[in-house]
Structure formats: structure tokens, C-alpha cells
Image: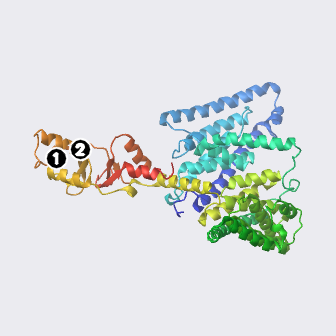
Amino acid sequence: MKGSKHALNWTTLLVAIPVGFVASWVTLGFREVITLINRVLFHSNNEITVAMHVWPWFFWPLLVGAGGVLAGFFLRYAVMIEQRKTVKTDYLEVINARLDAVPTRTSLFRALSSIASIGSGASIGKEGPMVQLSALSGSLMGRFVPASFNLKNSDVVAMAAAAGLSSVYHAPLASAIFVAEIAFGISALQRLIPLIVSSAVAVMTMWSLGLRSPLYPLVEAQFQMDTTSVLFSLLIGVLAGLLGWLLINLISRSKAQFARVRSLPLRLGIGGFAVGLLALISTDILGNGYEVIVKIIDGDYLLPMLLLLLVLKTAATTLSVGSNAVGGLFTPSLLMGALLGVAVATTGAILHLPVGNTLLYAAVGMAAVLAAVSQAPLMAMLMVLEMTLNSSLLFPVMLASVLASMVVYRLQSASTYPVISAHFNRSEAKYDFDNMRVSELIIPGAALQLQESVGKALAVSTLKRERYVYVIDAEGQFLGVVSIHEISRRVLSQEITLESPVSVVMDDDFPCVFQNQSMREGWEAFARVTLERLPVLNNPQERRFMGALTKTSLIQKAQEFL
């Protein structure tokens, strides 16, 4: 994996954090404006359904109507600007179309219109203008993001919109998924629908059989959110990422060592024997680890045993998977995560830090290690939440899972699931393609001076195997092209001779691309012609010939993610 060109990188997180912070304050500010209007109009901090009663009933239609009139004026002005400047204001349209910015004036006037409607009691929600203003704040902040971060303004707008929606509903996961659907397309979500249905049917079947309790007994406990607990969740995320990276590498080396044993029965026999030796220390390392997780959550282990089991389970899993034992890594990863999470929290408790219920950190560790090993953080956090049915774990599980996944990603470890690694590779290839410039694929092109002969053009064409030869002046400025087929036709018809200058057959109106254009623009240029090559110039002003861009090179680059 490469460094600075990653679509997923630390700089993206450095942008997302302040954007989320600012967006939340924008939504709070909007709430305060509505509250202020309530105080002015109704002398009350109550919701409009209660506050309206301070006015006689016959004033109610007038108040709502007056608010609507005022809102209409603001909205009309916003629409006039949009029509005159042909801009799109709605943040969803900006994200979907990957536009440069959310318009400031029209967003503010639409927000004023919304404030007038909401403040006077119109039957609409507050979330729309809140998210729109949050998106605007992201758009404004995006202008100050350095170009080296490789972030489009619409990416920052998407972050801010998700943060705004999350601030309104206190639903970060759902908000992120909602904005991702708009920002990055719905095809993936459409594919999720049948999977969700089949999963729901399976769960309903289990429920009908009486298996309705959560998989792990943490539903009654509540995770206390404070600075210490958040810091410990972050620490578990980092350590889980390191543990996941270590496990992935140990498994890879174990497979390489076991591959020397060509007989599969012998190979698995050796692996099983080694695991059996480890079981002499503790039989808790055997199996997938489900019962051990339950015992951890019940508080049956002290810190020394937690650490010992973590080492033993890591070794046992490495041996089993390395020897090609058929099975999954989900539950072993969950067990290692539970051991890690409770061990870290228990250490904090021994140091008299206010970590709260140490056993709840088992779930945080479970999600984090699973995310690290699988490189599927969304799946990991959702799985742990569904297995525990404890919504108070949402925020720490999200933090730890994403951080653990990022650590493994940045340490250049592949997922234990090849299909996920393939997805990452395609994603990186697509990201590279979208951010590459034409200059990166330039090849030398056959070029002649204006006064040189068509005979030389034919010779150069034969040598280079090109249909067109480019014509430049003494300073290297692109003048046009000569077609070999046109030269042959005119020589055979005796209109010109082989000694004639190329200027007599030159086409000075030939399509070209510029070196600083994107690969997508290069692709679009080829879509308009039937040529295999296009000349590349330095810029539209100087038009200095730099070389050629081939359709084949573009297709080969695109094949990496198609």
C-alpha cells in the first residue's frame, strides 16, 4: 500500500474531527435561535405546541401565517439567486454531484426562511436547515484544507452533513450511512437489501425457537461516558490494531512454515498437537472461545489470567489457522478482544482510574480486534452491538473499531479475508485514477518541424508505427498533425511529392489534452474521438508539445479497479 495517496489516511481524520465539532455547534446555534424566537413571541422556553397557548386562539392562524409570509420572502430571494446563477443549494445535491461548494447566500436565506416557519409553528422538522447549515460550515472549512490532503470540498461537505444529522438525532452510525448512500452511490446499499432480509428471517427463526436473549450478557449494564472512559476506548482501539496486525503477520508466517509440510494430514496434525500442548497450561484456549467470553463478562478472571489467556489464544489461533485448519476467525478475534479490553480496563482500575464497569470494555475490545483482523469496522461494531443489545456501547465501540482498523491499514497489513483486500486494492486503484494527472502517463510522440518533408514523416511513422505524426515549431509549440493515410493518398494522386513540406498536409485543428488534466478528463477526450493516441500539451496558453497519451494506457490503468 502507498502512503500519501491513500483515500483513507490520517489527514482525512484530522479534517473530520474539527468539521464534526463545528457542525455540532452549528446545530446547537440553530436550536438557540429557535429558542430565542420562542422567548420573544411566547415568553416561554417550551415547545411550540405548549408555548402557543400564551396567545388567544384566534391569533394562532395569524402567527403561523405571518411566519409563513416572512419565510416566503426569504425563500423567494434564495430561489432568485439560484436561478440567476444556476447553482444548487441543497447539500445532498452538492454531495451527489461532487460540486465545489455549498452556496453561502442561498443557504443562509433558506435557513432564515426555515427559522421563520419553524419559529412560528409550521409543521416541519428542524433537521433540514440544521444539516444544511452544517454542510455549509463544512464547505467553508473545506476551502482551507491544503491541496496536499487530496480532499474534494464535497467530501468535507459530506462529513459536515453526517455530523449535523448525527447531532440532531444522536445517531452517528445511521447518519454516516445515510450520507454515504448519497455521497458514494446507492449500489452497495441496494445489494445489502436481500442480505438484510435473509438475516432478519434467520434471526426471527431463532426467536421463534425461543433463542431471544442477547448472545453476550451485557444488556443491563450502562457504559458511563466521561473523559477517562473515552480515552480508554481509544487506547483499546490502538492496542487492538496492534494486536490485529500482529495476528495477521503471525498467521502469514505460520502458513509459510507449515507449507513446508506437504502432507495436509501431517500438517494439521502438527498444528493440533502444538495447540494441545498449549492447552496443558489452560484448556480455555481450545475451541472458538464463546464460553470463555461469557466467563470474562461474568468477571471470572483476574488480570494475570487475562493476559496469559491473551498470549495463549493468540498463539493457538496462529497455529490452527497457519496449519490450514478450516474455520473462521470471528469468535477467536472476539475472545482476544474481550481479553484485551477487560485487561486494559482492569489495569486502569488497579491504578485507581475512574474507568467504570471494567467488564463492559470486553465489548469494546471485541469490536476493535474484530475490526482490525477483518478490516471491516462497520460490520464489527454492528455485530457487537447486536450481540450485546446494549446501545450505550455504541460510541466507544465506534471509536475503538475505526481506530483499530486504521492502525492495521496504516501498518500495511492485508485483511485475513482476501475479498476485503481485493476491495481495498480496487478502492485504492480508483482513488489513484481519480487523482492522477495526464502527465503521469505521457509517452514520447513522433514530432517533426514544419519545414520537414512528408517523406520523412512516412519514415518516422513506419519506425514508430503511428498513424499520425505531430508537427511542432522550433520552440516546441504544437502546430498540428499530419496523417500518414492522407500523405499516401496525395502522393499517389501526384498532388504532392515526397519532398513536399509537411505543412501542405497538416491538420491544425486536431484534438489534444493537457498535462495537468485529470485521468477522467483524458478519458472523456478519448470518448469524443476514435483515435488511439492524443497529443499532450503543457497548457492551453503555451501549447508546448510534451508527448502523447494512449487509450491503451488509460484502459490498463482503469482495469485495476473495474
Q: Nearer the viewer, residue 165 or 184?
A: 184
Q: Which mark is residue 333?
A: none
Q: Residue furthest top?
A: 58
Task: Tell me, yes or no, if residue 356 can be seen here.
Answer: no
User: In x, y percent, where is residue 511?
Assistant: 31, 44
Q: Nearer the viewer, residue 96 or 493?
A: 493
Q: Image quarter for residue 439?
A: bottom left
14 left or right of 508?
right
Q: Image quarter for residue 192?
A: top right
Are dots 1 and 2 in contact, CB under 8 Å?
no
295 left or right of 532?
right
Q: Nearer the viewer, residue 279 or 330?
A: 279
Classify mark 1: helix, strand or loop: helix
180 left or right of 5?
right
Q: Which mark is residue 508?
A: 2
How would you rate the neighbour count of disc 2 (Cα within 10 Å): few for under 14, some for 14-19, many for 20 or more? Answer: few
| Amino acid residing under circle 1 | Ser
Please determine whether, in this image, residue 337 is positioned above or below residue 455: below
User: In x, y percent, where is residue 533?
Assistant: 32, 48
| Amino acid residing under circle 2 | Asp
User: In x, y percent, where is residue 19?
Assistant: 63, 54
Q: Which sits earlier in the primary sequence, circle 1 or circle 2? A: 1
Q: Which residue is mark 1?
A: 503
Q: Image quarter for residue 203?
A: top right
How would you rate the neighbour count of disc 1 (Cα within 10 Å): few for under 14, some for 14-19, many for 20 or more? Answer: some
Q: Nearer the viewer, residue 363 or 286?
A: 286
Q: Residue at x 52, y 44 (%)?
A: 99
User: In x, y percent, where is residue 102?
Assistant: 56, 44
Q: Real-space Cα distance between discs 1 and 2?
A: 9 Å
